[in-house]
């Protein structure tokens, strides 16, 4: 059993691959040009352009290494891994917030994919974790810093096209 395994939707893994490919290709070329320009200025002892380019090179290399590790240890959750009517990673859910009398829509994603502003919540967040395994019609109680919240699951579907 791998310690660093993280769950991703197909779209979430593709975003990691795209970022890695951009950093290894286009971004690395930009940094090489910056380094060449900075070296052409001479006087390496007080060359802030060279220092900045080297710092950026180090940050990009570290991010590439991190992405490589995430990709290597990624576990893809597909439609065949879960029941269609049960909330899991990759589910799109509509909830009724009983206290606020409003409907909310979320996509359940892996931790690295979470983007609450765009309705993507992690399966490890308080709401996401409470929803895992629930079905349409279930009442879910979520413990939050401001007290317990109650939600009714209105519908469960599969997230498509990264939405």
Image: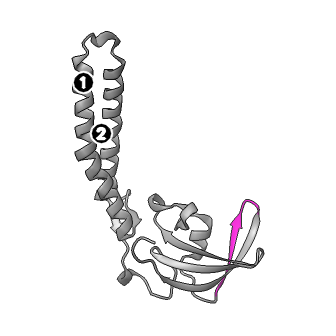
Look at 57% across and 70% down and name the residue there.
Answer: 129
* Residue 84 visible: yes
Q: Is residue 83 left or right of residue 76?
A: right
Find residue 136 and report its horizontal and vertical position in percent.
59, 88
Residue depicted at x 39% and y 70%: 9
Instruction: Tell me, yes or no, whether the highlighted magenta stretch contains residue 144.
Output: yes
Which percent across, then down, holds residue 17?
29, 57
Query: Could you tell me if residue 1 is visible in this image?
Result: no
- Residue beneath label 2, please? 61
Colour approach in the figure:
one colour
Residue 57, percent across and down? 30, 33
- Tell me the quarter of the image containing the N terminus: bottom left
Tell me the crowding category of disc 2: few under 14, some 14 to 19, or many 20 or more residues within 10 angstroms, Cα based. some
Overall secondary structure of the magenta section: strand
Q: Are marks 1 and 2 in contact (CB under 8 Å)?
A: no
| Image quadrant where residue 72 sits | bottom left
Name the mark on residue 18. none
Provide residue 90's location: percent of width, then percent of height.
Answer: 45, 75
Which range of residues does the magenta coloring cover?
138-146
Name the residue tied to disc 1: 37
Q: Looking at the image, which residue is at 45% across and 77% down?
A: 159
Asked if residue 3 is positioned above or below residue 141 in the image, the reply reads above
Of residues 148 and 58, the one nearer the viewer is 58
The question of residue 91 being in magenta is answered with no
**Looking at the image, which residue is at 48% across and 60% down?**
111
Q: Secondary structure at mark 1?
A: helix
- Mark 1 and mark 2: span between their CA atoms? 20 Å
Q: Is residue 51 left or right of residue 94?
A: left
Reading the chain from its start, which is encountered first: label 1 or label 2? 1
Circle 2 SS class: helix
């Amino acid at each position: 059993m791998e310690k660093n395994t993280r769950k991703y939707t197909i779209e979430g893994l593709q975003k990691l691959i795209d970022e890695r490919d951009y950093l290894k290709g286009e971004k690395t070329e930009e940094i090489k040009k910056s380094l060449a320009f900075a070296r052409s200025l001479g006087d390496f002892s007080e060359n802030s352009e060279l220092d900045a380019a080297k710092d950026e090179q180090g940050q990009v290399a570290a991010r590439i290494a991190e992405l490589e590790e995430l990709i290597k240890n990624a576990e893809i959750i597909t439609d065949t891994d879960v029941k269609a009517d049960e909330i899991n990673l990759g589910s799109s859910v509509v909830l009724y917030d009983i206290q606020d009398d409003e409907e909310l829509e979320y996509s359940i994603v892996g931790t690295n994919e979470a983007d609450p502003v765009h309705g993507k919540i992690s399966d490890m967040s308080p709401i996401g974790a409470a929803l895992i395994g629930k079905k349409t019609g279930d009442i879910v109680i979520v413990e939050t810093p401001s007290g317990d919240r109650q939600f009714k699951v209105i519908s469960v579907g599969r997230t498509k096209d990264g939405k």
